[in-house]
Image (cartoon, rainbow, N blue to C red):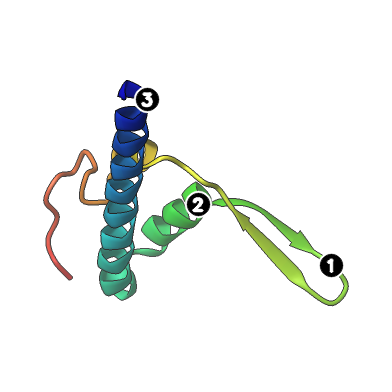
Amino acid sequence: MSSVQGELDGINQYLRDNDFMLNEARDLYSRWQQLTFEDKRSIVELIVKDIIVAKDEIEINLFYAPTGNLSHHPLLKGGERGNYPSC
């Protein structure tokens, strides 16, 4: 029984993490045009693992980071700056 509860807890955490990331992405999208170049660069550097340029295509690989790592980024709601002005 405890293993089933553990699986359910894991699924619930996964869903909460996905909701968190979706809300952060929507919020970031709504503020993107007002961010400085430096802030945009910081976000891109945080999420892009690498960029592969081939003859006929460009591949951009993103990091997968558990929300705990991103929640402290200063440009996200969970970040150290706390509440920021809406843009």
Give the camera-side residue of 49 and 67.
67
Mark earlier in primary sequence (3, 2)? 3
Quadrant (top left/top right/bottom left/bottom right) for the N terminus: top left
User: How far is mark 3 from mark 2, CA to CA?
Assistant: 33 Å
Mark 3 residue crowding within 10 angstroms, few (<14) / some (14–19) / many (20+): few
What residue sits right under mark 3 in the picture?
A: 3
Mark earlier in primary sequence (2, 1)? 2
User: How far is mark 2 from mark 1, CA to CA?
Assistant: 21 Å
Q: Is residue 25 above or below residue 43?
A: below
Which amino acid does the dot numbered 3 rest on?
A: Ser
63 with respect to 73 (left or right): right
Give the camera-side residue of 20 and 38.
20
At x 52%, y 46%, the residue is 64
Mark earlier in primary sequence (3, 1)? 3
What residue sits right under mark 2 in the picture?
A: 47
Provide residue 83's location: percent of width, then percent of height.
11, 51
Provide residue 31's location: percent of width, then percent of height.
26, 70
What residue sits right under mark 1 in the picture?
A: 54
Q: Residue furthest front?
A: 1
The answer to whether mark 3 and mark 2 are in CB contact below 8 A is no
The answer to whether mark 2 and mark 1 are in CB contact below 8 A is no
User: How far is mark 3 from mark 1, CA to CA?
Assistant: 46 Å
SS at badge 2: helix
